[in-house]
Amino acid sequence: MNSGVPQPHELLRGDSLPACRRPPSRAGRRTRRAGFLVLGLLSTLLFASSALGATASVGLGSAASFSVLAGSTVTNTGPTTMFGDLGLSPGSSVTGAPQVLGQTHVDDAVAIGAKNALTTAYNDAASRPSNGSAGTDLAGQTFLPGVRTASSSLLLSSGSVTLDAQGDPNAVFVFQIGSTLITGSSTTVLLVNGAQACNVFWQVGSSATLGTGTRFVGTVMASASITADTAATIHGRLLAQTGAVTLDTNTITTSNCASSVTGSGGGTETTTPAEALKLAEATALAEATTSAGAPGGKGVSTPVSPSGSKPTGKPGPRHSSRHHSSRRGSRRRSLARPALPHRRGSFTG
């Protein structure tokens, strides 16, 4: 008997089946959409908090165009080249005739304005909250973006220090140094994963010394003086507030990007072909200079046999004619021999 009312077992058959499943399916879609919205909101908040927590660049203002800026004097030895401006104030003595590809401003309104901008930038860098210690020796360390502090002196004794931007070209590195910054000979500051020299700042409480052949990166802002030893190369700036900047056969290439003047961040740093060529020449000179000064450096060679192989010390086969062999031996002894290291000392060639 069919009264027209569906029986319970008929509710799960035929046309009624999709109707039974439709409401849960719609509810599931609504739940997924809500989940995606929540995830998107969380991602946005995390990104915003990360951006707010990122270290801002240090705006150099009118000091950004200067490769070298000093307070008392600028002294140079050898063929130094700087691609930016040279400034001095309140001093008036520039000696040694460095090659300045930008403009030279000695105790004029431009130099005075740049010195004032340097003071502002120095105080800004010094007042940043620290993200941790830089230690006492940078050698072998890797730093992520942020502010690192050394309460007294900071040394790069050997090898290299690495600054890792983790894929962010706007990543900023600030080093707050209580007194002196000193780098050893042939040391290197390495930039990896998008790090840019225009976003690296060294705020130095007293004086900085860059050792022979150092390959340095970033803007050095020293309270007193800065010395760049023979063949040190700098991709950045040497800015001294009160003291002298002393140069010796150095190459200083510019490191400008959108953040250099304003400190607002952004922009890609570029190196001109002329800068790249000069930097390559300077690097080769630095390597030659440090190699020549090292024990067992250039000029020391290992004797090589006529066949191109090194002597083994084993006696070779006897010649059929003793007289001819003796005459050849005398001829060899009469030739000048290359200098050899002393047997009692260590030798690295």
Image: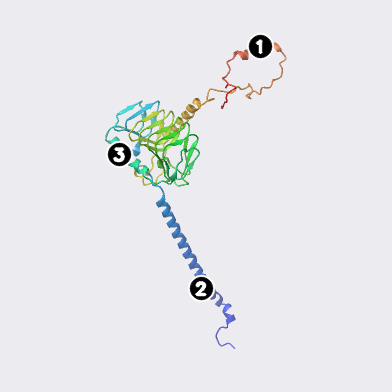
Marks 1 and 3: which is nearer the front?
3
Distance from label 1 to label 2 (Cα)? 109 Å
234 with respect to 63 (left or right): right
Q: Which disc, if any, is residue 84?
A: none
Q: Residue at x 37, y 42 (%)?
A: 126
Residue wearing tag 2: 23
Image quarter of residue 247: top left
Mark 1 surroundings: few (<14), some (14-19) or many (≥20) residues within 10 A? few
Can the viewer see residue 103 in this picture?
Answer: no
Assess whether mark 3 and mark 1 are in contact (beta carbons under 8 angstroms). Answer: no
* Residue type beneath disc 1: Arg
Whichever of labels 1 and 3 marks the residue nearer the N terminus, that label is: 3
Which element is circle 2 on? Answer: helix
Q: Position of residue 160 (x, y in %)?
A: 49, 37
Q: Residue at x 49, y 25 (%)?
A: 293
Whichever of labels 1 and 2 marks the residue nearer the N terminus, that label is: 2
* Residue type beneath disc 3: Asn
Q: Position of residue 251 (x, y in %)?
A: 41, 31
Residue wearing tag 1: 327
* Residue type beneath disc 2: Pro
Which element is circle 1 on? Answer: helix
Distance from label 2 to label 3 (Cα)? 71 Å
Mark 3 surroundings: few (<14), some (14-19) or many (≥20) residues within 10 A? some
Mark 2 surroundings: few (<14), some (14-19) or many (≥20) residues within 10 A? few
Which element is circle 3 on? Answer: helix
Residue wearing tag 3: 116
Distance from label 1 to label 3 (Cα)? 79 Å
